[in-house]
Image (spheres, rainbow, N blue to C red):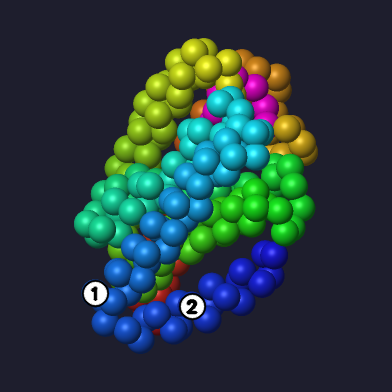
Amino acid sequence: MLVGFVVFFVWFIRFLKQKPESIQQRILLVIALFLAVLQLAKIPLNHYTDVFDVTKDIPLHMCNFLPMIMIWVYATKNRTIWATIFFWIILGVSQANFTPSVEFSLFHYDAIRYWMVHLMLVLLGLYPSIVWGWDLELKDVGRSFIALNVVAGVIYFLNLILGSNYLYVMGKPPGTTFFSLLPEWPVYILVLEAIIIVWSLMVWGVFRMVKKTSRVI
C-alpha cells in the first residue's frame, strides 16, 4: 500500500502541477470532499448493517475530521489553517499509515476508507508546500500545539459523555502502534505532549532546511 501510494504521489504531483493553479485547487478540493463523504458515509452504512457504535463511528478521531478541515483549506487557500494542521498530518496521520489500527482487511469498506483517508491526507497536506511553495514559520509550531490541545480538551469531555476514546486521550489505541512504546494513561499524555513539541520543532527544522536547499539549487 505504501509503495503504491508513493508511486501514485509522484505521478499525481507531476500531472497536476502542469495544470493552472485554479484547476489544481478545484481538483484538490474535490479530493478533500470525497474523503469527507467517504468518512461520513461510515455512519449510515453502519446504521444500515446494524453495527453502528457511537463510541467508535463518529468522526472525532484526528484522521476522521481532518478531511473536513482540508475542505476549508482548499476552498479558501488558507495558509494559516494549513500550517496549523500540517504537523498533525506529518506526525499523526503518517504514523497511522506505518502502524495501522484498522480492524478489517481489504477489500472491506472500512479498510478502503481507512487507507484512502490516511494516505490521501498526506498528499493533501504536502501538496501546497511542494507545488505552491507554502512555507512554515516557527510560530506555526506553537499555534499547532495550542490548537491540538484545545481540540483534545473538547474531545476529552465528549469522551466522558459518550464513554468513548476518541483521539485516544482516554487510553491507548488497540493493536501495536507507536503508543505501545509509551507509559500507561495518563502519564503517556504528558510524554506525548513533550514528544509532539520536540518532533514538531524537528519537522519545522527539516522543512526549513529542505526549503533553503531547494532555493539554492
Q: Compared with residue 216, is residue 59 higher up or lower down, i.e. above or below?
A: above
Q: Nearer the viewer, residue 107 or 147?
A: 107
Q: Residue at x 37, y 26 (%)?
A: 150
**In front: 71, or 193?**
71
Q: Amino acid at mark 1?
A: Ser
Residue at image mark 1: 22
Amino acid found under the numbered disc labelled 2: Phe
Looking at the rendering, which quadrant does residue 178 occupy? top right
Determine crowd level at label 1: few under 14, some 14-19, many 20+ residues with C-alpha closer than 10 A.
few
The residue tagged 2 is 12
Quarter holding the C terminus is bottom left
Which contiguous range is marked in magenta? 166-173
Sequence order check: which comes first, mark 2 or mark 1?
2
**183 left or right, relative to 24:** right
Q: Going 48% across and 77% down the picture, which residue do you hit? A: 12
Task: Kindly state the secondary structure of the residue where label 1 is placed.
Answer: helix
Q: Is residue 213 visible?
A: yes
Classify the position of the N terminus by image quarter.
bottom right
Could you tell me which residue is drawn at 64 percent across and 57 percent down?
112
**Viewer-side residue, 147 vs 111:** 111
